[in-house]
Image (tube, rainbow, N blue to C red):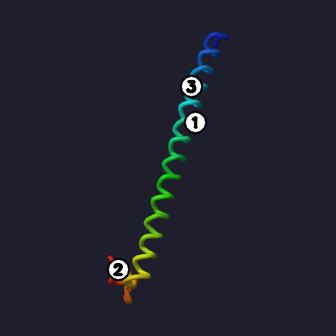
Amino acid sequence: MDKEDLKQQLEEKDKQIKKLCAEVGNLEFQITDYRQIVQELSDRLKNYETLHGTVFRPSKNISDQK
């Protein structure tokens, strides 16, 4: 393996690392978005339950949960 091959491999690895870092950044952004959505829906559910009572109740018998 000569220096040129090694240089090419390193450049390819750098490209892969940059691509993966961009993907991780995108996924982190999506996670932040989803957390905000879950929090908003949880708040809405809590407000609804305050006004109208419990919406979701656990089953008394585990075998009923499907």
Query: Closer to the camera, 31 or 59?
Result: 31
> In the rendered image, which residue does mark 3 sit on?
15
Q: Residue at x 35, y 84 (%)?
A: 63
SS state under label 1: helix
> In the rendered image, which residue does mark 2 sit on?
65
Inter-mark Cα distance, 1 to 3: 10 Å
Q: Is residue 4 above or below residue 64?
A: above
Residue type at numbered disc 2: Gln
Residue 23: image x %, image y %? 51, 38
Query: Closer to the camera, 4 or 61?
Result: 61
Residue type at numbered disc 1: Cys
SS state under label 3: helix
Q: Is residue 65 above or below residue 25?
A: below
| Of callouts 1 and 2, the N-terminal one | 1
Locate the N terminus by quadrant.
top right
| Of callouts 3 and 2, the N-terminal one | 3
Horizontally, residue 29 falls left or right of residue 62, namely right
Q: Residue at x 51, y 45 (%)?
A: 27
Locate the C terminus by quadrant.
bottom left
